[in-house]
Structures are given as C-alpha cells and as structure tokens.
Image (tube, rainbow, N blue to C red):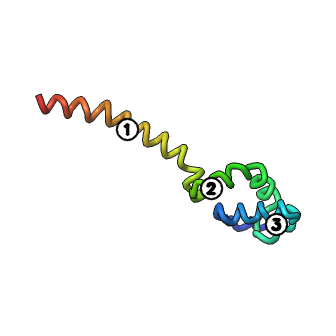
Amino acid sequence: MPKRKLTVKTLNEKCKALKEIEKGLSNKEASLKYGVPPNTISTWIKNKAKYFKALEDNCSSKNYYYSKFESLLLQEKLEKCKQAVIPDFFKKQK
C-alpha cells in the first residue's frame, strides 16, 4: 500500500475547515474536502482554540509552532554571548 502524500495546510485553511465543521460538516466530509486523514481533522478540532488565537494574533501556522522553540534557542545564544563576548568587551576597554 503506497504512503499517503503529505499535505501541509495553512492556518487559514484549518480555521476555514473548523468553521465549516461547526456549521454541520462531518469530520469525514471535511477530511475528503481538504485532502487530509480524518484523524488530522480530529487533531485540528482538539487544537481549535490555539488555531483561532494564532489567527487573531496574525501568526502564520509555521511561526506559531516554532516560536517557542526559536525563542528558547535565541535565549540560549544570548546567554552564551553574554558569558563570552561581554566580559571580553569590557576587558578591552580598560
């Protein structure tokens, strides 16, 4: 059995599907319409509040998922810079 092709849906597409489901579209019909498995629709429903909040905040879905990870990386890099660069900078000025 061949693997299903991976499709990435935008935040707008997910929210549009969720609104249609609220209006009465079944999960199975939504999965066929948007070309995703039914369990993906269930996951979207589970994360509905997060998606609508991200849409409200004008975030892209990619930025929404990676912002926490990227902020942690940025904090780590910033701490390394503070520890390595700043002491050297002050030593050179004396």
Residue 9 drawn above or below residue 74: below
Name the secondary structure under disc 1: helix
- Image quarter of the N terminus: bottom right
Comparing 24 with 86, the one in front is 24
Locate residue 93 relative to residue 7 in the image: left or right: left
Whether the residues at callouts 1 and 2 have beta carbons within 8 Å, the answer is no
Indicate the quadrant where residue 36 lies: bottom right
* Residue drawn at x 16%, y 29% as measured from the top left: 91
State which tag comes first along the sequence, 3 or 2: 3
Q: Dot 2 corresponds to which residue?
A: 56
Residue holding disc 3: 30
Residue nearest the observer in this picture, 53 or 78 = 53
Q: Are marks 3 and 2 in contact (CB under 8 Å)?
A: no
State left or right for residue 15 relative to residue 92. right
Point 80% across, 65% down: residue: 20
Residue bearing mark 1: 78
Task: Give how far apart the Cα atoms at labels 3 and 2 are.
Answer: 23 Å
Q: Amino acid at mark 2?
A: Glu
Q: Quadrant of the C terminus?
A: top left
**How far is mark 1 from mark 2, CA to CA?**
30 Å
